[in-house]
Amino acid sequence: MGLDRRSIAAAAAVGVFGVGTAQAAASVAFLPAMTYTYSEEGLRLAGAAPLTLPTIRVTFGNSLTYQDNLLLVLPGITPLSAVPSMALVVCTAGPGSTVGPPTLGYVGTVSAGWNFRVTSVHGVTVGDHCDFTPLEVQGASLAKSNGLLEYQALRFITGQRVDYASSSTSIAIRSQFGISGNGLPAVAPAYIRLNAEINVYSGRTKFTPASTETVGAGAAPAPFPTRNDSLSFITTVDGDGVPFTGPTVTVTSQTLSIEGGNFEWTDTTSPAGICFDSGIAAFPLWSIDPASTCNSLTLVGPLASTLNAGYFQITGTSVLSPADWTGTARWTYSLGTATGVTELSWDPGAWTMNGVQVYIQYLPYGEGVSRIVYVAHSGLLAADAEADIYVNGARVGCDLGTMPARQVTQLTAAIDACAAAAGIMNERVAVLLTFAAPDADIEVYSAYNVGGSDRGTVINTSNGRGLTYPSRGD
């Protein structure tokens, strides 16, 4: 017959523990009483190596008899066999004892714990307590535990549970590594994200409105509020200063990557095609990894926790594109000869635009081929339009003029004229259209015609995005 904690008191009232048996609240805890925080990475690299737990104290809430069993369980762990000795279990008589302290003997390991047995003939008196140390576990297994230590006493032969206690959670597992927004608070001033709006009215070469953030807007050598976008973040390699119990890893590298857009605007000197000549500034102790590409920036940091405040500074002449920046923080580390890697995603922010862009993935040029491009503009105000023609690894910029309000306008002639001026004769191109208008006001139709009879409709990012105003039925 087994009893849970809520049943013990009721069971005692009806004699389950025996006539005249005294009973009180049992307890089990690590000593000294505190939260013991372990490094997740340290435990993982520790593997099967022994890890000694803090001293465990059990205060008995029921009288136990000779050869009753006592179990200590820490869910998830892989226990290691204890070495029997006089120091393994040290017991103290409670205030109500008239027979002195009890004695316990070590039996062996059980699932996620250890088995001890009462060896004193006079048993255990309510209020006695025993301290258990050292008890060891396989280091990596502690990371799987919920930290909730349990004690129970079982009657010899019958196996009836006659005493029980569980600790409050006193073991915590925490990563040594974090970055603002993922493992660390995403709050200012420690976490300022990229949030610039690209201004279509300046040819997509500047931001609007002017930055008012301290980082970037007032940065040396000169403030360019419409050319700067601030970025700040915190990284930690020590659990944000939390004292760890047990093994911690040694950091061997700390890097941050930023993707989700292009960095062509940082290519400011010869030779062309090599980015990060300029544009990324004022991140103390961090440098740009030479392996960075125009689509992926990697910053290499020190082997310590850092607070970083810097900015992206555009040239004011390069054409920009909206970007939903994504980031990854990556740490490598070691413990002895073992090595490991931790990666965390983080959000560097986004660049938006005060207009709308439509991408036409395919338009052919050649003999007997014509193109059909129309824009439907439903807004109340006229909208300026531009086109970027992408061909053979190059970009050709085109001014398409102004789109009248609430009107369908043909864009084919203007696009073809721009393509002809660039020498595009027999090519397949893609076209990015930019309008100084809200997204919902613009819809583009695109197609091509071969030989005057075969029309191929091209699904673009405007007419392929679904219904802006979906129908609703009752």
Image (cartoon, rainbow, N blue to C red):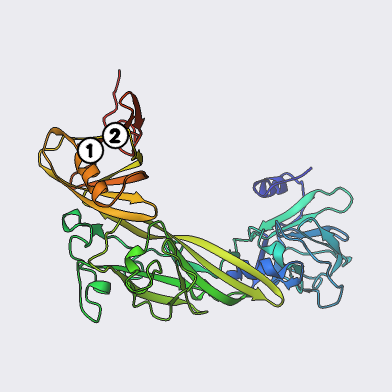
Residue 51, placed above or below residue 160: below
Between 233 and 372, the one nearer to me in the picture: 372
Residue 299 rendering spot, x and y as whole percentages:
45, 72
Determine crowd level at label 2: few under 14, some 14-19, many 20+ residues with C-alpha closer than 10 A: some
Mark 2 touches mark 1? (CB < 8 Å) = yes
CA–CA distance in space, label 2 to label 1: 9 Å
Between 9 and 291, the one nearer to me in the picture: 291
Q: Which residue is mark 1?
A: 412
Q: Earlier in the sequence, mark 2 or mark 1?
A: 2
For residue 405, side relative to residue 439 (left or right): left
Mark count: 2
For residue 301, side relative to residue 247 (left or right): left
Tell me what residue is drawn at x 71 percent, y 55 percent.
164
Quadrant in the picture for the C terminus: top left
Q: Which residue is mark 2?
A: 370
For residue 340, side relative to residue 451 (left or right): right
Between 264 and 306, the one nearer to me in the picture: 264
